[in-house]
Structures are given as structure tokens and as C-alpha cells.
Image (cartoon, helix red, strand yellow):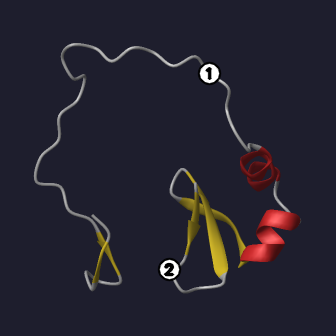
Amino acid sequence: MISRSSPRSPTIIVLRDGKMVEHGETRQILKAPRMDYTKALVSVRSIEHEEKEPTPKPLLSVRNVTAACGGGAVKVL
């Protein structure tokens, strides 16, 4: 997972299994990642796949979900 440390931050944190693998300036991570895991993530630009028809019944239904960052100060959902 690649995540910016905050919406206004010029840095990126790369997590694998919940542990930080690499962090640094956005430009450096995207242009010259150091770790193999980060290189693999950055190398994927798109994944070709065949679109499937929607199923008549949803596979998953979610209600009343919220998400926030910054100690709850910034709502993201």
C-alpha cells in the first residue's frame, strides 16, 4: 500500500502487512524507489482484465461506514 502521510504532505509512506517498508518525498518514491516491494507497486500502471457483468445480488453490502484521518479531524468518507 502506498499512502501519503497527509493530504498536504510532500511525502509518501509505503506499508506492507501494516509495517513501513519505505518513506520519502513523493517524487523520490515514484521516480526512484529503493525497496523491491515499492518498485513492484510503482511499476504497475494498469491491470488489464475483462469486465464482468454485475451480479443480480450484491456480493457485499456496507452501511454506516465512516473514515477519518488526523485524529478524526478530516473526514474521508
The nearer-to-camera label among 2 and 1 is 1
Check if mark 2's residue and mark 1's residue have beta carbons within 8 Å: no
Taking the spot 28% from the left edge, 14% from the top edge, the residue there is 55
Q: Residue at x 67, y 26 (%)?
A: 48
Above or below: residue 76 compared with residue 44: below
Q: Residue at x 75, y 55 (%)?
A: 38
51 lies left or right of 67:
right
- How many residues crowd around disc 1 within 10 Å: few (fewer than 14), some, or many (20 or more)? few
The spot of residue 47 in percent (x, y) is 67, 32
Q: Position of residue 70 (x, y in %)?
A: 35, 84
State the residue in front, 15 or 59. 59
Q: CA distance from mark 2 to mark 1?
A: 30 Å
What residue type is disc 1 on?
Answer: His
Please name the residue that numbered disc 2 is placed on: 7
Quadrant (top left/top right/bottom left/bottom right) for the N terminus: bottom right
Q: Secondary structure at mark 2?
A: loop
Reading the image, the residue beneath label 1 is: 49
Which one is earlier in the sequence, the residue at label 2 or at label 1? 2
